[in-house]
Image (cartoon, helix red, strand yellow):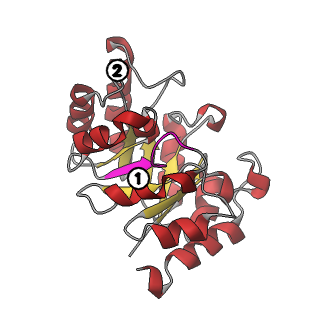
Amino acid sequence: MRKLEVIVLNAADSIAAEKAGADRLELVTDMAHGGLSPEIEIVRDVVSSVSIPVNVMVRFEYDGFEYTHQQFLELLEYVESVKKLGINGVVFGSLTSEGLVDEDQLEAIIEAADGLDITFHRAIDEVDNNYLTNFNLINGKVTTVLSSGGTDYPLIDNLASLNAVSESKTRLLIGGGINANNYQLVIDSVVEADIHIGSLAYNQGDFKLGINEKNVALVKSYLTKENHN
């Protein structure tokens, strides 16, 4: 069955998202910068507050997806800390200066995660002419890839690219630009994919205003209709 993942920032968001039907949570902080790693105490609080899987963002910097050796060591230390807290997985992505997946860093994260699920996040969308190359570099190595299908906007312009990778070994999780006007089209158009929502899950689209349980429930209901499975 297709799954709905919801971005959350704290325990209150997480409880409300689970109540509304979310299958999995992506826990982050600082959505003004695209989502960074939450503090350890927040991770602990969220995991203890819900029964559904929690994936934690592993990203400290908001200026691109290239990491120095020291920055990357700090990310590895963070993974070592959060993996002990009962999380389901980590969300990570890094690129080389050429715009390709940094395979060495990815392998190190996979090793540090020690069997947890790995989601490669939307760093994969950053360099459009490398999209399929980058997907092939991670295909089968990670559990999930969070993607809007490339650099084009709106997301619905990327449906062909998303369909092209939707039946791969790595599970496609569509996110970035899903809204009240297009979620049904996205769900109908790419049938072998899970769905990831952020601002759509929040009151007035504002991450500071809490989860809009009605919106989450609407997306979940449409996603799990028999004709979409």
Which labelled disc corresponds to residue 72?
A: 2
Say which amino acid is labelled 2: Phe
Q: Which residue is at a point 29% across and 63% down the rendered structure image?
A: 167
Question: Residue 193, relative to residue 142: is it above or below?
Answer: below
Mark 1 neighbour density, 10 Å: few (under 14) some (14–19) many (20 or more) = some
Which labelled disc corresponds to residue 161?
A: 1
Please indicate whether residue 34 sits to the left or right of residue 72 in the image. right
Say which amino acid is labelled 1: Ser
Q: Which residue is at a point 50% across and 34% down the rendered structure image?
A: 37
Q: Position of residue 55 (x, y in %)?
A: 42, 49
Q: Which residue is at a point 28% across and 49% down the rendered structure image?
A: 116
* Relative depth, front residue between 73 and 148: 148
Which type of secondary structure does the marked residue at label 2 adopt?
helix
Please indicate whether residue 39 sits to the left or right of residue 125 in the image. right
Chain part drawn in magenta: 144-152
Given this view, does label 2 or label 1 mark the residue nearer the observer? 1
Which labelled disc corresponds to residue 128?
A: none
Q: Position of residue 166 (x, y in %)?
A: 34, 60
